[in-house]
Image (tube, rainbow, N blue to C red):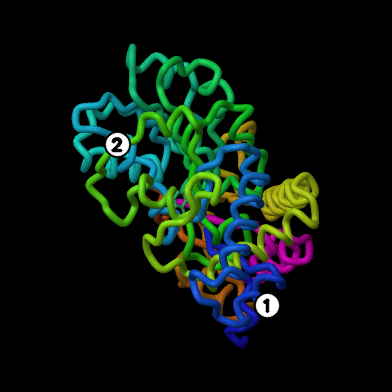
Amino acid sequence: MPISDRLLMGPGPSNPYPEVAQALAGPVLGHLDPEFLAILDATNDRLRQVFATANALTLPVSGTGSAGMETSFVNFVRPGDPVVIGVNGVFGERMCEVAGRLGAHLIRVDAPWGTPIPPDDLLSAHPNPSIIAVVHAETSTGIRNDIAPLGAGKGDALLLVDMVTSLGGIEVAVDEWNVDIAYSGTQKCLGVPPGLSPLTVSAAARERMVERPSSWYLDLNLLSRYVQSSAEGGRVYHHTAPVTMVAALHAGLGAILDEGLEAARSRHAECGHLLQDGLEALGLKLFAQADHRLPQLTTVEIPSRLPDGTTEADCRQMLLSRYGIEIGAGAGQLAGKVWRIGCMGHTARRRNVLALLGALKEVLD
Ligand SMILES: *Cc1c(COP(=O)(O)O)cnc(C)c1O
């Protein structure tokens, strides 16, 4: 199986949209070339559409999704600030690690992995938090956490949401939900290789930015000047934008918007259901609570009886070497307990789901 034929059905990266591959093969422009700057501006406009926001400060941070997470905390957390963080998977844990390093007064709200975090638990965790942070789509468990009730009940707190696996795959409505800070990643449902982290910040949150964050590279005071319009004083160089990755993101967002956001989400939903029904038809048990199950990331329990002499890792390896299909291992406390199957971005197609189900049946027979 040639490596170029890989079908990426792990927790990310997904297969890129064909338009993205074309952009990656295009000419490299200078990072201050007006042609590149026009692509950057258009990319930020497209990000606003996909995030469903009018936020002026919307940009792709250089770095993967974790760079967006770090940017979101380092610019808003001062030592001692009460920060409420929901934890029902690996990425909620990572948020705690990042906020803890900044000296936040951490208020952790845990929910069992595979279940959503009740919004009221987050809202009542502290009388006056500076930030309430939660992961929208937990890629380690396949669970969606509800965001809208948090925006409605957050009071003076800033609402900080990880949208790495949700953006482009399920509904995201930054302005309608009252989200103040949100970040994503390119390699999940946006169907672009890893390397950028789309970020958006509300006007209210901008008023509360740390003046001199401990990270120079991720300082939004400086980054915002690099993307500002001429009306706002024009651009000020900060660091060399990864021009090719920006062009790739521009193309990926273009593919999604051409298809239509709604249509792209329906495609993810349809493929997720086809996959989940198909796994159950094979006699496998889904892990995530049914009413908050993500279509784009499915966790399935590893069957207790595998073919003679094989481990769960052998099964994944067989899928990869025989069929060219990658699925993911369990992460954190779910290591060895579940497999994680992604149906994200360009990968979310019926034919891919059917190929995986057929291959998995052969492997498990
Ligand atoms: C993948 C992921 C991240 C981390 O992104 P990287 O691109 O690996 O840095 C953060 N949060 C969630 C929910 C993710 O799925």
Vertical side of 272 occupied by 112: above or below: above
Task: Give the residues drawn in magenta, as a range.
Answer: 337-365
Q: Is residue 130 visible?
A: yes
Task: Report the number of numbered marks.
Answer: 2
Cβ of mark 1 under 8 A from ligand 1: no
Mark 1 Cα-neighbour bin, 10 Å: few <14, some 14–19, many ≥20: few
Q: Marks 1 and 2, Cα distance to the nearest angstrom?
A: 39 Å
**SS label for mark 1:** helix
Residue type at the position of mark 1: Gln
For mark 2, what is the residue? Answer: 210
Instruction: State the predominant SS element of the stretch in magenta.
Output: helix
Q: Nearer the viewer, residue 49 or 310?
A: 49
* x and y, in percent, of residue 1 in the image: 62, 86
Element carrying mark 2: loop
Give the amino acid type for the residue marked by disc 2 in the picture. Val
Ligand 1 within 8 Å, label 2 CB: no
Q: Which mark is residue 22?
A: 1
Q: Quadrant of residue 190?
A: bottom right
Residue 275 horizontal/vertical position (percent): 70, 53
| Front residue of this view, candidates 241 and 67 | 241
Residue visible at 30% across and 39% down?
Answer: 96
Q: What is the x, y in percent for residue 245?
A: 53, 69
Q: Residue at x 64, y 75 (%)?
A: 23
